[in-house]
Image (cartoon, helix red, strand yellow):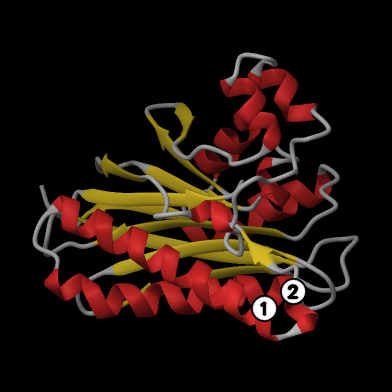
Amino acid sequence: MAVTLRIGAHTELGNYRENNEDAVAVRRFDDFTVCIVADGMGGQNAGEKASGMAIDVIPRELNRHLPSARTQDDIRKVIRQAVVQANEEIMKIGQLDRDFSNMGTTVVLTLWVPSFRDDVLFIAGVGDSRCYLARGGTIEQLTTDHSLAQALVESKIISGEEAREHRYRNILWKFLGSREVGDGPDVRVLFTRPGDRLLLCTDGLSGSVPDDRLLSGLQQFTDPQRCCEELCKLALDMGSRDNVSCIVIDIVEA
């Protein structure tokens, strides 16, 4: 069964911020579609600079190298290389310009290459922006946070529930702008089904709205654009003190 994507995207400054350090991008090329959410960090305008670079460099590099990809492993390698290139360029600007010396950004992305397989999405993330899958009345987080709190969970020192309120939940050990990116992120391959809905979001949303409320929001609004807008509004109504951004992707029959 052939499938295609319906996509909505939205970002909100929020109630307590003077500038929006988040960035969202839906870039459609002839051979692929990439969706990216990035949450910048750093002094003054540095966070905006870093997240803006991420949503520019990654699609550029994908467009440059995907035409030569022939297999699933090839595509995963191209994604990792694109993220690594964005990381290198962000670090380089930070080294050259003192105003951007501490900048960084999270990134979470999906890549759809219908000429390869139209029922497959490639998913990757660095930092604590997340990808969720809503399917069959359940919600599943598909990415892993690169926070100190999550590292404690993986070491079995604290529980996942404790991590949600832990003082280290917003302290990242890996993000774009850091050497810990290494050879790039893990890339997950998702075999989709019609009716699937994916959510990419910054922690301005996931850090304020629990998973069950995220699922309710994803189920309530059929239009992906309105769903994005309502989820961002929900986060602000629930007290988010951050910028709030998300992309909603529907898998539908072509």
In the rendered image, the vertical position of residue 146 relative to residue 54, given as above or below? above
Q: Can residue 200 be seen in this view?
A: yes
Please name the residue that numbered disc 1 is placed on.
95
Asked whether 54 or 182 is in front, the reply is 182
| Picture residue at 63% right of the left edge, 62% below the top | 105
Give x and y (percent) for residue 186: 38, 45
Mark 2 Cα-neighbour bin, 10 Å: few <14, some 14–19, many ≥20: some
Name the residue located 74 percent from the left edge and 74 percent from the top edge: 101
> Is residue 137 placed above or below 145 in the rendered structure?
above
* Disc 1 residue type (three-letter): Gln
Residue 49 rendering spot, x and y as whole percentages: 67, 78
Query: Foreground: 52 or 207?
Result: 52
Instruction: Give, as a three-letter code, the residue at label 2.
Output: Ser
Res 118 seen here: no
Mark toward the start of the polypeptide (1 vs 2): 1
Left of 199 or right of it: where is 93?
A: right
Q: On residue 162, which mark appears?
A: none
Q: Label 2, on which residue? A: 101
Q: Residue furthest bottom?
A: 97
Rendered location of residue 142, percent (x, y): 44, 37
Above or below, comparing residue 134 to residue 50 in the picture: above
Quadrant for the C terminus in the image: bottom left
Which of 219/202 is in front? 202
Q: Distance between the residues labelled 1 and 2?
A: 6 Å
Helix, strand or loop at disc 1? helix
Locate residue 104: give its quadrant: bottom right
Estimate the x, y position of residue 253 in percent, counting from the top left.
21, 52
